[in-house]
Image (tube, rainbow, N blue to C red):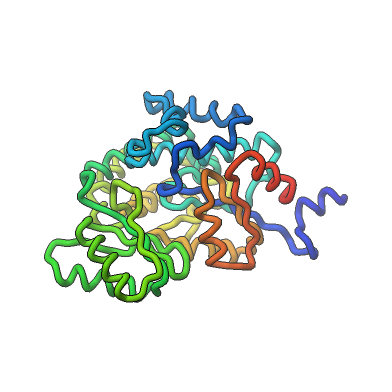
Amino acid sequence: MEDLLGDLYCFGGEKMIVAFTFPGQGSQSVGMLNGYSDLPIIKQTFDEGSEVLGYDCFELVNHGPVEQLNLTIYTQPIMLIAGLAVYRAWKYLGGKTPDYLAGHSLGEYTALVAAEALAFRDAVKLVQYRAEVMQECVPNGIGAMAAIIGLDDDVVKAICSQIVGNTEKVILEPANFNSPGQIVIAGHKAAVLEGMELAKSKGAKLVTLLPLSVPSHCSLMYPAAEKFQKLLKQTDFCSPQIPVVHNADVQQHQQSSEIKKILTQQIHSPVHWVGTIQSFVSQGATHIVECGPGKVLSGLTKRIDKTLVNFSLADSTSLQHAIEKLN
């Protein structure tokens, strides 16, 4: 009886509701899974992904070069595989099934695989093609993304509007609403660089160009979304066995047609991460687990809602610790 109650309730008698989040591009680094070297299921998952991709992605993760890892055609499938590898390790070691799932941008595909809505191999193929059409749409060096910290949403929106208004045929838009006071902008590289300087003049605490080769989640991605939709239509989806909150509309979708529609929209729409975490809270979530390399999402969650208990599964030790606390 005590074990059962421990599985359902956290301290103080409050029901424990656990949501998993999966990272996307920007969390990658060479050696990012070194802390999981004691778990064979990690490499097994990468081997399965490598069969689909036609190259040794585990070698790239472990040894680089970083310039190749940061190209979206490599980053996207590798981050999908990495997130799922950690989730498989969680389940293999007896971790409880989450109550809700979400993924940041690309991480949404990892969430759908974890929810059994999408087969792993199909997800690898989809994400690889997604990366290809996105890179083709905006060749490397033409677009960019930058994080702006310390300005309100409305100020950043006004900066984008001002730059677009001053220059013909330039795109600059808010792409990620990551946390209060942290927004990512995306568009033509020259416009992004101008936006960074204007943000500094407006009092931004930090402005950083991100190591990404395509400007995701902005209007430059419309042609990529149209191409991507063709492969999506040929891919089988099932109803998620675990609810997935989607980035573009902060909603859960059950029907295959709805999921395909929102995944197409996601490519050129902002990531509403603040809204995603707030959606978890509104549904009673008490604990958030970042499942994958790095601790980026955990940092965002703490800034969005300080009442949530955070875990990041950055290595096998932290994974085992989280299982002990949450099971």
Height in image: 228 above or below 165? above
Of residues 285 and 265, which is closer to you in this image? 285
Total marks in image: 0
Residue 42 on image: x %, y %: 56, 31
Identified at 37% across, 24% down, the residue is 54
Residue at 39 percent across and 65 percent down: it is 206
- In this rendering, position of residue 170 left or right of residue 290: left
Please name the residue shown 41% across and 64% down the image. 177
Along the line of sight, which residue is nearer the eye, 244 or 21? 21
- Asked if one can make out residue 239 in the rendered structure from this viewpoint, the answer is no
The answer to whether 245 appears left or right of 93 in the picture is left
Foreground pick, 286 / 155: 155
Instruction: Name the spot of residue 36 as percent of width and height, x first.
Output: 59, 35
Quick check: can you spot residue 250?
A: yes
Where is residue 116 drawn, in percent x and y? 54, 40
Q: Is residue 228 above or below residue 304?
A: above
Task: Point out residue 225 in the picture as x, y percentages from the top left corner.
Answer: 28, 48
Q: Is residue 2 left or right of residue 257?
A: right
Which residue does the image show at 38% across and 25% down from the upper left?
55
Residue farthest to the left, as pictured = 168
To which quarter of the image does residue 233 belong? top left
Image quadrant in which you'd find residue 268: bottom left
Seen from the viewer's position, the closer of residues 17 and 321 is: 321
